[in-house]
Image (spheres, rainbow, N blue to C red):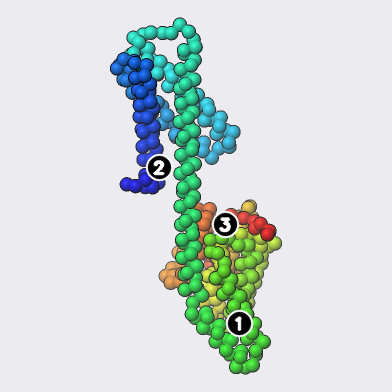
Amino acid sequence: MNWQQLVDNRQRFFWVLQIAGWIGYALVNYIGSKVFEMRDIYVFVILLNAYAGCLMTVPLRYLYRRVWNAKPWLLVLVVFTASYATGTLWSVVQKFNLWEIYRHGYRPDEWFYYFQQGLDAVYIILCWSGLYFGIKYYQLLQGERQKALKANTMAHEAQLKMLRYQLNPHFLFNTLNAISTLILVEENKDANKMVSRLSDFLRYTLNTDPIKKVPLEQEIHALSLYLEIERVRFDDRLAVDMQVSDEASHALVPSLILQPLIENSLKYAIAQMTQGGVISIKAQVFANELLLEVSDNGPGAELKDGQLVNATGVGVANTKDRLKTLYENNYSFVLSGNTPTGLTVNIRIPYEKAVAE
């Protein structure tokens, strides 16, 4: 087992550090006893004290885990109170070991000796608490770093999949074929617009960093380019209804998070309807969360427990993977039937407002 595996296993890592730390404490005290030329029986007292300290600090771990997310002032209060109580109790055990085992019932006359040893024990427990929180925060930082690396990798994979599957040769073929048709019928102005839109959309997909989030209004602009390209193929059969609130338009979203869902609606809804259909895109902010909805009035799809049955595409799966990587469990992705027909995709993610440049 390497060091990283040991750090990742928090239970084992705690016990390794706990035992090693108290062994180190015992060694330091043993070296000090040699300096003061104490009797060999004092080594036994040192071991008992270290063992008692090891056992008494274990409950602190579970206490600190329970108050980990508490307010800072409450957390500090709990740490100092628990450290003082544990240190005081430990000092009583140390006095018992020292006076009953090493000094055979000796009691000092001065109260200062009681107080001093008690404070020493409290300081050591406070140091233990400080090390615990320091190592805990280090583990959290390492965890966040690993999540960022994983998100980086999956985002690049999602971008590659998008270029390979979502912007597939069929899309480019259909677009170029539509441009060719416009040129043949001498609709050069419309053909030039199509080339410009295709160029802008492809440039956006290549230049947008898949790791960073972008304002929703920027995504809506890219979707508009994509839909304008597809509208040449579907003509009047494709209608789009966009309802995006002003607050939602400034929210940060993963780049190209809605494009695969729009493509699914085009492929499985609009393309299947002779009279055409409507794709609806809605976005609003509610309770500090961004709510996104993509729906169509097509023939719909078979659902089971909110999942597509016999799904063969990659759009829905890629979208869910990206959301899972970026937001862990702080998101929702729900598929449901539309009324009266069609499919609706609802996405809920934390609301993050874009900072104006």
Residue pointed to by mark 1: 195
Indicate which disc, 3 or 1, sits on the residue closer to the N terminus: 1
Q: Secondary structure at mark 3?
A: strand
Instruction: Quarter of the image for the C terminus: give it.
Output: bottom right
Q: CA distance from mark 3 to mark 2?
A: 29 Å
Residue occupying the point 61% across, 91% down: 183
What crowding class fits label 1: few (fewer than 14 Cα within 10 Å), some (14-19), or many (20 or more)? some
- The spot of residue 121 in percent (x, y) is 45, 22
Q: Which-is-in-front pick, marks 3 and 2?
A: 2
Q: CA distance from mark 3 to mark 1?
A: 34 Å
Residue pointed to by mark 2: 10
Q: Residue furthest right?
A: 246
What crowding class fits label 2: few (fewer than 14 Cα within 10 Å), some (14-19), or many (20 or more)? few
- The spot of residue 100 in percent (x, y) is 35, 12
- The spot of residue 304 in percent (x, y) is 45, 64
Residue 44 location, quadrant = top left
Label of residue 349 in the image? 3
Q: Relative to the observer, which residue lies in front, 238 or 137?
A: 137
Q: Secondary structure at mark 2?
A: helix
Residue 239 location, quadrant = bottom right
The amino acid type found where label 2 is placed reads: Arg
